[in-house]
Image: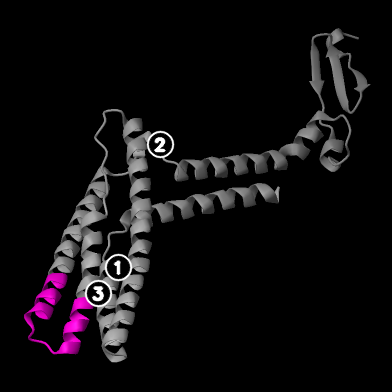
Amino acid sequence: MPQSAQRTHIAMGPTVYTHASRSEATPLRDESCDLDCKITDARPACRGRRDLPRQLVLAVTCAALLLGHATAFADCESGLPRTDLAEEQRRAGQWNLAWRIANTAGATAQFAVAASGVADHDTTRALWISGAATTVGALVSWLIPLEISVPPASDDRCVEDIALRAAVARGADDERRAFWFQHAGSLAVNLGAAVAIAETVSWQAAARSFAIGYSVSLLQTYTMPRAMWRHRRSYSLRVQAIGAVGVAIAGRF
């Protein structure tokens, strides 16, 4: 019989080879791998097929975490706009100037009326006390203003991005401190003035003074620029949400 017609079947483990010559070996399909891939044996095809879902899950999880990282932490080419920081600096300067003028004018007017003698005795006393409280607000506006700094421009985009982020962080801290200081300070000053007026004049006059003085203080507090503070809070929430999603995806597998 010719050599090309000789075919010898040799069984080697889980795979059957058909031997036609020394240089020709063609693997036949082993259907046992398709029927039972859950058996933990030494079959490479079965083991690769069994590990595929886990590899896919790991790939999806890594992709989600990398996407979250890229979204939360922008690279140097996508820094914060300098114009936003400059605009917040402009608004802070206008707010400082407006309330310096308003508080100074209010204190001056109350002292002027109290010193003129045109009002009755009780009203004059109340004007002196409320004028002193307004003077405290004016001094705070002049001596402790809200300041937002804009860093100098840089040709290096990474240096520019780091400087802008640091300026936003400082501005957010200053706005937060000023907001709560304004709340607590105005409440304390107006309550003190109301108690003094109640002791020297009447509780009715004290209630009127507190209502007017604290309402003006709240108007000053809630017209304060707070864009950097809001930006920092929203950025922190995005980072926390992305991190939680990544942990949840990884924890499921």
How far is disc 3 from disc 2 in space, using C-alphas? 44 Å
Check disc 1 and report the residue beneath it: 222
Residue under pointer 2: 75
Element at label 3: helix
In the image, 173 versus 247, the foreground residue is 173
Q: Earlier in the sequence, mark 1 or mark 2?
A: 2
Amino acid at dot 2? Asp
Q: Report whether residue 27 is seen.
A: yes
User: In this rendering, which labeled residue sits more in front, label 1 or label 3?
Assistant: 3
Q: How is the image coloured?
A: one colour
| Magenta region includes residue 251 | no
Horizontal and vertical percent position of residue 195: 33, 81
Mark 1: which amino acid?
Tyr
Q: What is the CA distance from the residue labelled 1 to the residue labelled 2?
A: 34 Å
- The reply to whether callout 1 and callout 3 are in contact (CB within 8 Å) is no
Which is closer to the viewer, label 1 or label 2? 1
Q: Which residues make up the magenta segment?
A: 106-129
Categorize mark 2 by other alpha carbons within 10 Å: few (<14), some (14-19), many (20+). Answer: few
Q: Which mark is residue 174?
A: none
Q: Secondary structure at mark 2?
A: loop
Q: Nearer the viewer, residue 90 or 81?
A: 90
Q: Give me the residue at 16% from left, 59% from top.
A: 97
Tell me the kind of residue under disc 3: Val
Q: Is residue 16 left or right of residue 153?
A: right
Whichever of callouts 1 and 3 sits on the residue coming sooner in the sequence is 3
Would you say 157 lies left or right of 33 here?
left
Residue at horizontal 23%, vertical 46%? 83
Q: Which residue is mark 3?
A: 216
Mark 1, Cα crowd under 10 Å, few <14 / some 14-19 / many 20+, is: few
Place of residue 222 in the rendered image (x, y in percent of width and height, measured from the top left)? 30, 68
